[in-house]
Amino acid sequence: MSRAAGASWAAGASWAASTVAGTVPLEIADSAGARAKGLLGRDGITGALLLSPASSVHTLGMRFAIDVAYLDRRLNVLAVRTMRPGRIGLPRVRARHVLEAEAGALAGWGVGPGARIVLHE
């Protein structure tokens, strides 16, 4: 089942994101606690993490560099940045969601400005 941005995320459901290069496993952080924790305490991630709602991120306390895609309300990619640990990202005015993955992953998946992310349950 495909979902649009802003739809209610089903608790405990398995999600995936479709990209130019295929489908990748997706975790969704849609509560304040889940967004605050993000990828902290991890050594990596298989797939990606969607923070919703969010317009900026930080990598304070992170153990690895990440790619960050800033998404608008329709999940169109506005910008992509790679952030090393210990950095604070600037908020993006039109961003409503943020997609995080290990550094280099987004380029490998063909995710760049203008691309659209499609979520599947």
Image (tube, grey):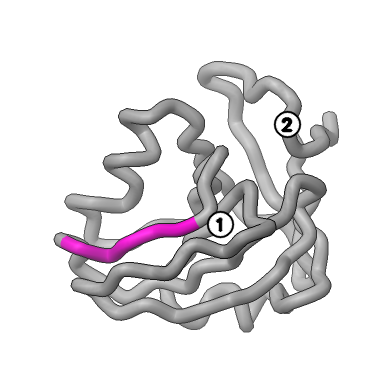
- The residue drawn where x is 20% and y is 63% is 60
Which image quadrant for residue 63?
Answer: bottom left
Q: Which quarter of the figure is the N terminus placed in? A: top right
* Residues at marks 2 and 1 touching, judged by CB atoms closer than 8 Å: no
Q: Where does the image place residue 108, in percent across and percent down from the top left? A: 63, 81
Which region shows up in magenta? Answer: 56-60
User: Which residue in the structure is indicated by mark 1?
Assistant: 99
In the picture as drawn, the residue positioned furthest to the top comes out as: 11
Q: Main secondary structure of the magenta part?
A: loop
Q: Residues within 10 Å of mark 2 (few under 14, many from 20)?
A: few
| Disc 1 element | strand
Q: Where does the image place residue 10, in percent across and percent down from the top left? A: 63, 19
At label 1, the amino acid type is Leu
Question: Magenta span has 59?
Answer: yes
Which label sits on residue 6? 2
- The residue drawn where x is 81% and y is 61% is 116
At label 2, the amino acid type is Gly
In the picture as drawn, the residue positioned furthest to the front comes out as: 93
Q: Where does the image place residue 83, in percent across and percent down from the top left? A: 37, 77
Q: Which quarter of the figure is the C terminus placed in? A: top right
Q: Nearer the viewer, residue 51 or 107?
A: 51
- The residue drawn where x is 64% and y is 37% is 15
| Disc 2 element | loop
Left or right for 88, reference 3:
left
User: First in sequence: mark 2 or mark 1?
Assistant: 2
Q: Residues within 10 Å of mark 1 (few under 14, many from 20)?
A: many
Left or right for 102, reference 21:
left
Tag count? 2
Q: Nearer the viewer, residue 94 or 107?
A: 94
Q: Where does the image place residue 97, in percent across and percent down from the top left? A: 60, 49
Q: Does residue 2 show up?
A: yes
